Image (cartoon, rainbow, N blue to C red):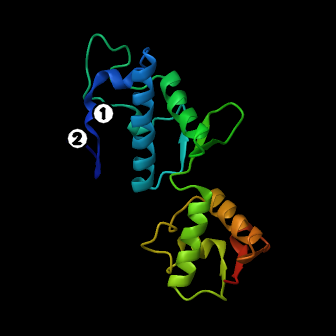
């Protein structure tokens, strides 16, 4: 099995047709499903939150695939990348960050799932009536070793706002984004 760093790639990653959008509907649907799962799994394990459609994202190419029949020799075309990311958007597992569909926010956990992880983190660490900065949640000592550590600030803020809407916490502004705080009331 091929590896990408410490990430174990699925068998289809070595199969050249999966790097070209398939014309037959059933085959294309299977291809898109496999790519969606791969993108979410890779992004989760590597803590990737944003994929640029035109950036060199290592998951979108396989230099080991070489064939005179494959125009891009193991690289996904722009059309393929957009199709796979758009499929994630349709499922609510990603969002385009711009109108031109150049950057995509990957939601390997849905916002509600991130909110649940935050609540679990708070309860597990005895922080039920505590105050923390947003930065402490995503990069503090308490969050080390959790999925919250290093998470994208946009996703974190959306999950916190969801919890605030449910009455689980209050967000208060500081003088800068680094000073934004959260008062848990669980």
Going by the picture, which residue comes out furthest to the top? 69
Q: Is residue 100 left or right of residue 114?
A: right
Say which of 16 and 144 sits in front: 16
| Residue at (56% x, 62% y) in the render | 113
Q: Where 156 sits versus 26, above or below? A: below
Asked if the residues shown at circle 1 and circle 2 are in contact, with their CB atoms under 8 angstroms apart, the answer is: yes
Give x and y (percent) for residue 143.
Answer: 50, 75
Residue tagged by mark 2? Answer: 2
Give x and y (percent) for residue 171.
Answer: 75, 74
Q: Is residue 167 left or right of residue 50?
A: right
Q: How many marks?
A: 2
Residue tagged by mark 1? Answer: 13
Say which of 95 and 132 sits in front: 95
Quarter of the image where one finds residue 60: top left
Q: Is residue 54 left or right of residue 169?
A: left
Q: For numbered disc 2, what is the local secondary structure?
A: loop
| Residue at (73% x, 71% y) in the render | 166
Q: Quadrant of the N terminus?
A: top left
Disc with the residue nearer the chain's start (1 vs 2): 2
């Amino acid at each position: 099995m091929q590896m990408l760093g410490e990430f174990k790639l699925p068998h289809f990653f070595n199969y050249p047709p999966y790097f070209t959008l398939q014309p037959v509907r059933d085959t294309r649907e299977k291809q898109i499903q496999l790519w969606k799962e791969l993108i979410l799994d890779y992004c989760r394990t590597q803590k990737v939150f944003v994929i640029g459609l035109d950036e060199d994202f290592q998951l979108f190419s396989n230099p080991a695939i070489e064939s005179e029949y494959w125009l891009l020799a193991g690289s996904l075309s722009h059309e393929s990348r957009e199709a796979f990311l758009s499929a994630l958007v349709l499922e609510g597992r990603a969002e385009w960050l711009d109108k031109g569909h150049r950057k995509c926010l990957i939601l390997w956990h849905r916002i509600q799932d991130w909110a649940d992880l935050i609540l679990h983190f708070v309860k597990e660490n005895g922080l039920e009536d505590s105050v923390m900065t947003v930065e402490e949640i995503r990069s503090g000592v308490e969050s080390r070793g959790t999925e919250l550590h290093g998470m994208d600030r946009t996703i974190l803020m959306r999950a916190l706002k969801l919890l605030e809407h449910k009455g689980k916490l209050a967000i208060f502004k500081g003088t800068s984004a680094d000073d934004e705080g959260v008062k848990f009331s669980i």
